[in-house]
Structure formats: C-alpha cells, structure tokens
Amino acid sequence: MNLLRPAVAALLAVALAACGFQLRREAHLPAAMQRVHIEIDDASSALARDLGRALQRSGAELVAQGGAGVATFKVYSHAYATDVLSVGGNARATEYTLRYRVEFGVTDAAGGELLARQALELTRDFTFDASQALGIAAETDLLRQELERDMVATVLRRLQVIARAAP
C-alpha cells in the first residue's frame, strides 16, 4: 500500500508530461515591442491599466510618450453593449448578453504595422431575476471585470502568435 501511492503519483506525472501539459507562462512579445506606448482615449480605464500590467509582466517597458524606438499599441475604441436574449411571458427580459468590443492595432518601433487594425468581441450571457435586482448590478460588474481580463489575455495571445511567427 505504501509503495502504491508513489507509483501512482509517478504514473500521473509521466502521463501529464506525455500529453504536452505545461504550466501557463507570460506571453512572449515580439522583439519590436520591448518598449511600448499604449495610446487609448481613457488612460485610467481598466483596459489600459490591465493591458499595461500584462505587457510589463511579459517583459515590455511601458513608455509614457511614443517616439523613436517605441512601439505603439493603439486602442481605437472599447465599449460595452447589452442585448436582450429572451423575454418571459410577462413581456420582461429574462436573459441578457453583455458584449465587450475592442478595436486595436500595433505599430512597431520603426513605425511599421506589426498587427493590423482589428476588432475583438467577447460576450457573456446572464439571467435577470426581478427578485434579485440588487444582485444584478454586482453580477454585471463582475462580468465586466471578467471580460476585461479575458480581453487582455486574448490580445496577448495575438501578440504572442506574431512573436512566434517572426524569424
């Protein structure tokens, strides 16, 4: 019995290694993004803050102003929208979808287009219960925070693909 536990643990470790499992690491950015300026209309927004932190964790140096030798991450727009998914028998909305759309592009330090202007949209669905109206505002705030985190992760994955494709 005492020998069985280490044997099972070793077998699980071998199985995980064989399937290609790796712990998540920070994104590897393209070499042209070692110094980055984030250009966004609201520099104090959660997107700007979270994106800046994620870029720094990935090894980039954030610069307050763009210029020579500085890549520019430009956020053209970022907005939330709420749409009704379903309506109940009393003609009131019972389900909503929260959409978060971000349009962005990246130019490298030499001014060349590193990532063409593109739009990403993430959605989350939630139900509305009139008896829990106070909780809906808190749930919506949590969904917005989750969408912002997911958006930053999605953007970093796009940048990482560019870094892998570079010779």
Image (cartoon, rainbow, N blue to C red):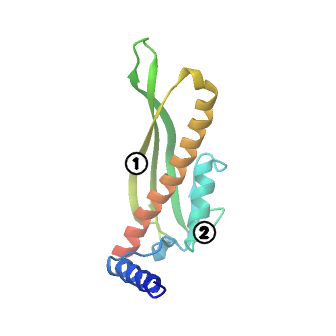
Residue receiving disc 2:
56
Q: Amino acid at mark 1?
A: Ala
Instruction: Pinpoint residue 121: horizontal percent, then vertical percent.
Output: 41, 45
* Secondary structure type for disc 1: strand
> From the viewer's perspective, is 38 left or right of 89?
right
Q: Residue at x 54, y 74 (%)?
A: 34
Q: Amino acid at mark 2?
A: Gln
118, 152: nearer the viewer: 152
Cα gap from disc 2 to disc 1, whole angstroms: 23 Å
> From the viewer's perspective, is 145 left or right of 7?
right
Residue farthest to the bottom, as pictured = 3
68, 122: nearer the viewer: 122
Residue receiving disc 1:
119
Q: Is residue 63 above or below residue 21?
A: above
* Secondary structure type for disc 2: helix
Q: Residue at x 56, y 69 (%)?
A: 70
Instruction: Pinpoint residue 53: horizontal percent, then vertical percent.
Output: 62, 63
Q: Give the total of numbered labels.
A: 2
